[in-house]
Amino acid sequence: VTVHSHFCILNVYVPCRGGEEKMKFLNTLHETMHRIRQQYAPKPLIVVGDLNMAPNPTTDRHWSFRSIPLPTIQTTTTSTTWESDLKRHWPTIQQMLSTKQAISVQTK
């Protein structure tokens, strides 16, 4: 968990296993998220990472082509709405990320 001035980020890796083991992990993750929300309220919690979930394995598996080319977006003059928003808010995002505070949490 990293705690920033305006939000918290929980970076997770969900094991690729299926069945009971995965459900046990997801239940523990849910409990951890609940504890973090209570501890750092009213800051929103953003969950990121490799969730290993692919509802449609033929189309929802490879994300390498979906990276965000920040240098290109910052210099382009024709942007989509999300690119314009990112360009406008990027300095604020960078400032918020620089205020991070790492907190070690162990789940079992």
Image: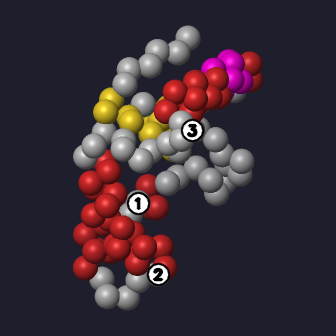
Element type at mark 3: loop
Tell me the tag on residue 27: none
Q: Mark 3 points at which residue?
A: 51
Name the kind of residue labelled 1 in the image. Answer: Ser
Up the image or down, 99 lies above or below 77; here it is: above
Q: In which quarter of the image is residue 91?
A: bottom left
Element type at mark 1: loop
Q: Give the magenta part as a residue range.
A: 21-29
Observer-nearest of 39 and 93: 39
Alpha-carbon neighbours of circle 1 within 10 Å: few (<14), some, or many (≥20)?
A: few
Is residue 4 among the parts visible in the rendering?
yes
Is residue 14 among the parts visible in the rendering?
no
The mark that comes first in sequence, 3 or 1, is 3
| Residue 50 in the image, given as x and y percentages of width and height | 51, 39
| Residue 33 in the image, given as x and y percentages of width and height | 58, 30
Disc 3 to disc 2, C-alpha distance: 27 Å
Which residue is located at x 52 percent, y 15 percent?
A: 107
| Residue 55 in the image, given as x and y percentages of width and height | 71, 48
Q: Is residue 36 left or right of residue 86?
A: right
The mark lying in front, picked from 1 and 2, is 2
Q: Mark 2 points at which residue?
A: 80
Observer-nearest of 71 and 43: 43
Alpha-carbon neighbours of circle 3 within 10 Å: few (<14), some, or many (≥20)?
A: some
Up the image or down, 70 lies above or below 105; here it is: below
Element type at mark 2: loop
Name the kind of residue labelled 3 in the image. Answer: Leu
| Quadrant occupied by the C terminus | top right
Q: Is residue 22 left or right of residue 42?
A: right
Which residue is located at x 38 percent, y 20 percent?
A: 104
Disc 3 to disc 1, C-alpha distance: 17 Å
Tell me the tag on residue 67: 1
Task: Please identify the residue farthest to the bottom as the structure is shown.
Answer: 78
